[in-house]
Image: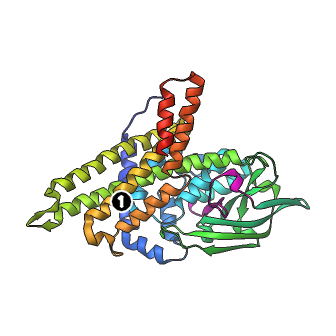
Amino acid sequence: MAIEYGLNEEQEMLKTMARDFLANECPMTHVRELMEDETGFDPELWKKMAEVGWLGLVFPEEYGGSGMNFRDLSILLEEMGRAVLPGPFVSTLLLVGMPVLAYGTEEQKNEILPKIASGEAVCTLAALEEDGDWWADSINIRADYRGGHYVINGTKLFVPDAKVADYMLIAARTKRTENPEEGITLFLLDTKEVYGTMSTLLKTMDETRKQYEVVFLNVPISAENILGEVHQGWPIMKQIALHTTAALCAEMVGAGEKVLEMTVDYLKERIAFGVPIGSFQALQHRASDLVIGLEYSRSLMEWAAETIKENDLDAATAVAMAKSFCGDTCKKVVAEGIQMHGGIGFTWDHDMHLYFKRVWTDDNAFGDSNYQREVVAKTLDEIHQLAGGGRWAKTAGRLTQMG
């Protein structure tokens, strides 16, 4: 598949508009205000994001959307990373909105997607449990069929934006089989119409995104609320992970580029021994390494977004490669940014730690860089097996060792 890197005129306009909007509507002072709020949610900002078309960006016009594609969405997410945007954008659009668009019934799409696009609904996914792993065998809460409906019992952890969610997509086990990927069902829960749920705010690294423990106690839910097919929820979960991982790559690149800009500005302004510290060759070399790493990261991120946009068969490999490189590179960028700022970079009042926490949290979500390298290595190993040996064997071996 041929990739056209860079942005067209319409995408440049989207990027410029997004940067201006976030600078005006969600400056760092507001980010810090939302950090102190238990929900981390600003309804007024959410409505404004709906008015400029962000919440329905990738939905068809028939559902109130703009009909744009995943590459366009990645541009928006990159700008959100630069702003360390708090709130439920990723949980609403990536974790629920896009899965409903792809797998929902017409009734489900007509009910939920226009509400997301208009800013009337916030959504989230309840997937992780006690071990915190994104594996099929980690999903153990039960959804038992009784008296014409399902009853959900169990506890979910690290549920983003649960306190403000109007709809919650729940991964539950409806059947025990030898293959843990079978017997998982996804339920769309209207949180305003049920009883038996209790959410507790968790202390997490990135306080700009609130995560909760959610307990389900005999929560009834109709079979009509199943997303996709009963017992067949895991393929949808894999698709959610694929899209969200690519989205987080864009966010990390945006955060990394903002940190680099802040760091270069500081190197020009900070005076030591009568000269700007940016004139010291050692710091110039370190900053140059970060520039190169971010350029590679951007190329991989754009490739991953393009493969998703085109429904390319290589999308899973492209996303894994992007995440492994973006994660390592952007973590290095934010760490070096703090170091090159010196003592002030370690203070609470400086914004550096906000970017550091966002990037590290993004890297850990849906499999960190080491996990993604294993995914790539396994893919190369499969190619090697199909090709009957050759140079792929050495490449796969090296990648496995790196992981």
Please tell me which residue is depicted at 48% across the width and 67% down the height of the picture. 206
| Residue 296 at x, y percent in the picture | 36, 42
| Residue 76 at x, y percent in the picture | 44, 52
In the shown orientation, is residue 322 left or right of residue 264?
right
What is the number of callouts on the image? 1
Main structural element of the magenta stretch: helix, strand or loop? loop
The residue labelled by disc 1 is: 334
| Residue 94 at x, y percent in the picture | 57, 53
In this view, the residue in front, 258 or 61, is 258
Membership of 18 in magenta stretch: no
> Callout 1: few (<14), some (14-19), or many (20+) C-alpha neighbours within 10 Å?
many
Please tell me which residue is depicted at 17% across the width and 66% down the height of the picture. 270
Q: Which residues are magenta?
A: 118-140
In this view, the residue in front, 342 or 127, is 342
| Residue 364 at x, y percent in the picture | 51, 57
In the shown orientation, is residue 3 left or right of residue 186?
left
At numbered mark 1, what does the secondary structure look like: helix, strand or loop? helix
Based on the displayed image, in which of its 4 quarters is residue 220 positioned? Answer: bottom right
In this view, the residue in front, 363 or 39, is 363
Based on the displayed image, in which of its 4 quarters is residue 189 positioned? Answer: bottom right
In the shown orientation, is residue 384 left or right of residue 195?
left
